[in-house]
Every structure is written in C-alpha cells, then in structure tokens.
Amino acid sequence: GGKGCEEILVSDSAASPATGEVQLQLPVNCSGTGVSLIASLEDTEGALLRPPVFTSRGVDIP
C-alpha cells in the first residue's frame, strides 16, 4: 500500500497505438512501497471485457 493512492481510478487511451503502451499520471500525493497498479482492458464503450483481461504490478513510488 501507499499513502494518497487508495481507490484511484485513472483512464486513458494508448499513448502508442502500435505497442499498446499507455502513460498515466498518478496524483502527486501518491507514494509508498508495494503500491499495486492494476490495468484492465475495456471495450469501446468503456465496459470491462468478458472474460476479464487485466494485469497487476507492485511498484515502489518514492
């Protein structure tokens, strides 16, 4: 966990459509060790895909 990172939902489209990479900005007060980032894929209407497609990663944010 971290401080200032709880229940933050950010959304954006691919910054690089060829690779599918995205670049998102977290709030400046979000920091800590072991912060969990979860990415989920949505359809064009913003609904989660079925079956769900997601990945989770733990990061340290100084």
Image (tube, grey):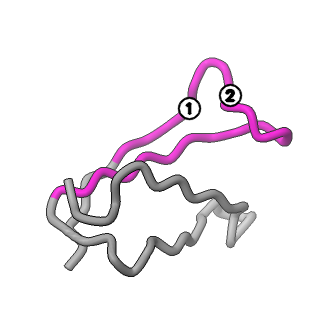
Which residue, as the protein is rendered here, is positioned at the far right?
45
Residue for point 74% across, 64% down: 17
Look at mark 2 in the image and give the residue it sits on.
Answer: 49
The foreground one among 38 and 53 is 38
Contact? badges 1 and 2 (CB < 8 Å): yes
Residue 43 percent across, percent down from the top left: 78, 37
The part of the chain drawn in magenta is 34-56
Could you say whether the residue bearing mark 1 is in a helix, strand or loop?
loop
Residue 53 circle label: 1
Q: Is residue 38 left or right of residue 24?
A: left
The foreground one among 39 and 19 is 39
Quarter of the figure that contains the C terminus: bottom left
Residue for point 57% across, 59% down: 10
Q: Amino acid at mark 1?
A: Val
Q: Amino acid at mark 2?
A: Leu
Which residue, as the protein is rendered here, is positioned at the far top?
51
Residue 41 circle label: none
Residue 8 percent across, percent down from the top left: 46, 55
Distance between mark 1 and mark 2 Cα atoms: 6 Å
Q: Is residue 55 left or right of residue 32?
A: right
Residue for point 37% across, 53% down: 37
Whether residue 41 appears in magenta in the rendering, the answer is: yes
Residue 51 percent across, percent down from the top left: 61, 18
